[in-house]
Image (spheres, rainbow, N blue to C red):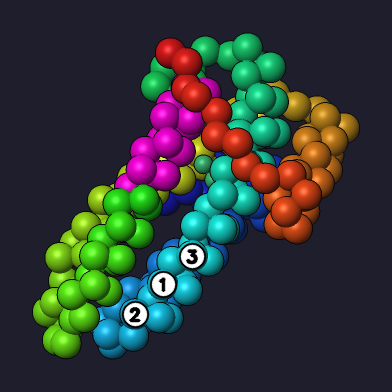
Amino acid sequence: MLRRMTPTQLPSAFQQGHRRLDALLLDHQEALIALDLATARRALAAYRAELEVHMAVEEDVVIPAFEALGVEIRGGGAHYYLLEHRKLDDLLRGVEEGLEELARRAPSRPRDVLPLLKRELSLEHVMEHHETREDYALYPTLDERLDDAARAELVRRMDEREAAARDGRDSFTPRRPRP
Ligand SMILES: [Fe+2]
Ligand SMILES: [Fe+2]
C-alpha cells in the first residue's frame, strides 16, 4: 500500500482527527437509520465542531507553513486544500439543511431517511479525496522540507491553535482560496 510509504512523523497524530470525523458521521448515520433525529442532530453538530477545529489548524498554521516553503506541486498547491475545505463546508451545510427538512416531515420508516443518507455520500467522497491529497502531498512535503526544529515548532503551533479552537478562544475564519 502506498499509504505506508508516506512519512508519518508530522501528519500521524493530527490527521487522526479524520478518524474522529468518520466516527461522528457514523454515529449520526446510525441514529438516522434508527429514526432518532435528536441524536442524529447532536452527532452532526459534533461533526461540524470537529471539522472546524481541524480546518482552523490547517488553514491558520499548516497551509501557511506549506505556502512559505514556496514549492510548486502540480495539483497539490495550497489553493486546492482551501477549495476543498470550502466544498466540504458547503456539502455539510446541505446535509444540515436536509436533516432539518427531514425533521419537519417527521419520518416514520427507515426508507424515509435514505435520500439524506445518499446526499451524505458526496460529503464522504470529497472528504476521502481531500484526506488522501493531504496525506500524499501536504504533510509529506512539510515533513521532507522542514528540519527537526522547524517541524517541532510547527507541531507546537498546531497544538496551540487546536487548543484555542477547542476552547473557543480563537474561532475559525475560513480562508478564501486564491488561484
Ligand atoms: Fe486534514
Ligand atoms: Fe483538510
Q: Which mark is residue 87?
A: none
Q: Tell me: 158 left or right of 98.
A: right
For disc 3, the marked residue is 45
Callout 3 secondary element: helix
Whether residue 159 appears in this view of the structure is no
Q: Tell me: 106 left or right of 72.
A: left
The answer to the question of whether label 3 and label 1 lie on touching residues, with beta carbons closer than 8 A, is yes
Callout 2 secondary element: helix
Camera-side residue of 37 and 65: 37
Corner quadrant of residue 100: bottom left
How crowded pointer 3 is (Cα within 10 Å; few <14, some 14-19, many 20+) is rated as some
- Could you tell me how far apart the alpha carbons at marks 3 and 2 are, in whole angstroms? 12 Å
The residue located at (58%, 14%) in the rendering is: 71
Residue type (three-letter) at the residue carrying disc 2: Leu
Range of magenta residues: 78-91
The residue located at (42%, 29%) in the rendering is: 83
The answer to the question of whether label 3 and label 2 lie on touching residues, with beta carbons closer than 8 A, is no
The answer to the question of whether label 2 and label 1 lie on touching residues, with beta carbons closer than 8 A, is yes
Q: Tell me: 97 left or right of 64.
A: left
For disc 1, the marked residue is 41
Q: Tell me: 95 left or right of 113.
A: right
Residue type (three-letter) at the residue carrying disc 3: Ala
**Residue extending furthest toward the front:** 104
Residue type (three-letter) at the residue carrying disc 1: Arg
Q: Is residue 50 above or below residue 82?
A: below
Circle nearer the N terminus (3, 2): 2
For disc 2, the marked residue is 37
Q: Position of residue 35 (x, y in %)?
A: 27, 85
Q: Position of residue 98 (x, y in %)?
A: 26, 61
- Could you tell me how far apart the alpha carbons at marks 3 and 1 are, in whole angstroms? 6 Å
Q: Is residue 148 above or below residue 171?
A: above
